[in-house]
Image (spheres, grey):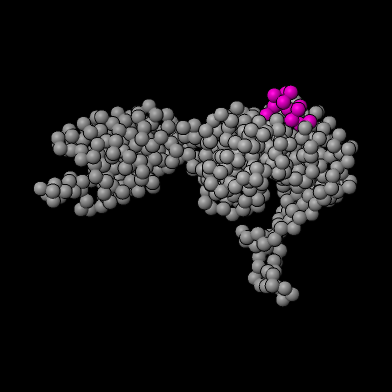
Amino acid sequence: MFASKMRHTDFSGAAILVVGDLMLDRYRYGSVSRISPEAPVPVLLAKREMSMLGGAGNVVANAVALGGRCGLISIIGDDDAGRECESLLSSLPRCKAELVVDRGRRTTTKTRFVSGSQQLLRCDEEDLHAFDGTITERLIYAFEQAVGEYQVVALSDYGKGVLHDAVLRHIMQKSRALSIPVIVDPKRKDFSSYEGASVIKPNRSELSAATNYPCVTADECEIAARHLSSITGADILVTMSEQGMVLYERGKPAVHSHATTTEVFDVSGAGDTALAVFCSALAVHYSKEQATFLANAAAGAVVRKLGTAVLSPEELNRELNRINQPLVEVICNLETAKEQVAHWKQEGLSVGFTNGCFDIVHAGHIELLRQAAEKCDRLVVGLNSDASVSRLKGPQRPIQPAASRAAVLAALQHVDMVVVFEDDTPFKLIEALRPTDLIKGADYTEDKVVGADVVKQHGGRVHLIELVPGLSTTRAVERIRAYSA
């Protein structure tokens, strides 16, 4: 599975042109300790205020935070909020903004009032009347001048007017002529206006509104998405909140990328982050399926942050490391294990190793594995093969075949990898993997631990774990046989 290898990303080669509705997001943070005597509403004691780029600006902020290069084409008003947007954009590295000033409208501003992590109220300031022809011409000219410098065009449509029909038509025609993919985060109900896009990214509500189909179940979403795809010619990427994302590529089965987090502080801007990551991934030649996985991981990470947040490469890579761990092929052959252990070490992770027959897993085994996992970042378990167990324990063992024993170990939260070995001892396996930490029960002394000299020779450590008294697989097997006799 591609996800198991996606533990590090590099978007430094990405170049994205964002066109859409720029906003200013303001946050006023404080605390609430009483209800107003004037009305049954909380009184927020404001302590600090923060401003950041929202809408299309947040897509840009995320794209450059990931290490890529980004352009922005949008509209601002001749006001303090517009000038603040200009200032924020000028502070971003690798960003080139072409902002058309419309003196007849206000810059869209959203002010959120927050107590702790709870948003109490949002106040919007905006004008939605149509642009005049001069503004449209300036937008189109800015796009003509800029588009050839970029690999992907991202359309951030918040329904504020930048992406009206004439601008959309020109973007689609010019991008198609240059073979540049266009990715749309939509707002309008009529998706036929997005014809010519490569991918359209609605949420489930937008999908339902655009098709007049119910979109509650997975089957209903697929029917609606396939219908939209037939109208627009685009692939459809549906964001489904706590259920993750689903990619519907034409002529291919749906691909579901499941949600990566259950801890949500603030969903503000999560869609912008997802759009930035999806476009960045396409720009550096990931497939759409891989880009979906990355975008979903990024959205899962950013909702755990407060405010309209951006994601750094380090934060995204940590999230990939966190969610990929269960996706790594846990039960490995030696070659796969060597490759994975090498990757872990390159990431600066310590790799522990312990071994055993684990014929009938009992509480003593669980405690050993729990303590072993505390000694390292990743724990590898060497498992004696069936032939090896028979040589060590007698011809009537193992009770459980290696495949079953490995599956039980792989299901334990403390175990990151299981490798079956054929020899009577794991010496060759330890020599091949070179773990940073070797863990064994305290019924051994360090000089009797197989592979201890190999690990210490390469700067590693040996740990002896106290065993739970009175627990033994051999005695458990004897009792089982006594009962069944």
Question: How many numbered badges does the structure rendering display?
Answer: 0
Q: Residue at x 73, y 51 (%)?
A: 25
Residue 239 is drawn in which quadrant? top right
Q: Which residue is drawn at 36% across and 45% down?
A: 412
Query: Which one is in front, 388 or 260?
Result: 260
Residue 69 visible from this viewpoint? no
Direction from residue 252 to residue 458 in the image, left or right: left
Q: Main secondary structure of the magenta part?
A: helix
Direction from residue 177 to residue 427 in the image, left or right: left
Residue 177, magenta (yes or no): yes
Q: Position of residue 316 (x, y in %)?
A: 57, 40
Q: Residue at x 72, y 73 (%)?
A: 39
Range of the magenta residues? 170-181
Q: Which residue is drawn at 73% across and 23% down?
A: 178
Q: Where is residue 428 in the image (x, y as percent from the top left)?
A: 30, 28
Residue at the front extreme of this rendering? 212
Direction from residue 246 to residue 432 in the image, left or right: left
Q: Position of residue 244 (x, y in %)?
A: 55, 44
Q: Position of residue 411 (x, y in %)?
A: 36, 43
Query: Which one is in front, 222 or 126?
Result: 222
Query: Which one is in front, 251 or 375?
Result: 251
